[in-house]
Image: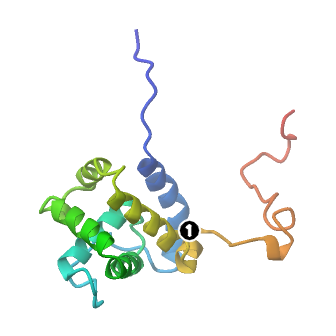
Amino acid sequence: MPDRRRPTVLRRDILKIGGSATLLPFASILELAGPRQRAQAGALAVDFKSLDHAQAILLLSVARTVFPHDFLPDEQYTKIVVVIDAKATADNAVAMRVKEALAALPNDFTAMEEAKREEYLRTLEGSPFFRLVYEETIAGLYGDATVSALLGYEGSSVEHGGYLKRGFDDISWLPTDKPVGK
């Protein structure tokens, strides 16, 4: 009897497939398609107040692993590290939490394969450190107008009459010869 279990599809797999299919044409037009970007020691030209350079590189790698967008340069993720550094500077408890979590990361975290980094970060999912990185990365990436434009988000439509007048019926993948639902 054949195995009828459902295949496991991870969020990351969907991002890889869907993101590549929709973003590659835009990236090539904007000349953003290129070799995969990784957190590099020279990528962070920022003076951090709470974190040292090695900790900042680790934090950048964590943020990039949590929300991987290979077409985004390290500078987009550096903005997130800057925000977390500012929070750590303002609050000693946050600073200790971040530094302890970064110190607990495997020594070769930035060099590990993506699957291994994901596996390790899954063990941290409920921790305050992971929540902080997760929340700041969501806000830092998807709240950034540059990233939103690269992802194809056109912005709010309230100012333009709402979605009924802007994008509601621009679905191009439905057949036009048959009414929907019949």
Viewer can see residue 67: no
Left or right: where 127 falls relative to 141: left
For the N terminus, the image quarter is top left
Amino acid type, mark 1: Leu
Q: How is the image coloured?
A: rainbow
Name above or below for residue 161 compared with residue 182.
Answer: below
Residue at the spot x=23%, y=51% of the render? 116
- In the displayed orientation, state which residue is furthest to the top: 1
Q: Position of residue 133 (x, y in %)?
A: 38, 65
Residue 88 lies, in percent from the top left, at 33, 77
Residue placed under numbered mark 1 in the picture:
151
Q: Eyeballing the image, is 12 above or below 35?
A: above
Quarter containing the C terminus: top right
- Residue in the picture at 46% in, 64% down: 135
Q: Is residue 16 left or right of residue 94?
A: right
What residue sits 35% from the left and 58% below the top? 128
Determine if residue 161 is in view. yes
Is label 1 in a helix, a strand or a loop?
A: helix
Camera-nearest residue between 48 and 93: 93
Above or below: residue 47 compared with residue 175: below
Residue positioned 30% across, 51% down in the render: 124
Name of the residue lying farthest toward the left: 107
Q: Position of residue 91 (x, y in %)?
A: 35, 76
How many circles with numbers are drawn on the protein?
A: 1
How far across and down, in percent of the image, does residue 76 sit? Answer: 42, 78
Q: Quadrant of residue 86?
A: bottom left
In the figure, 98 relative to 89: above or below?
above
- Which of the pair 127/53 is nearer the observer? 127
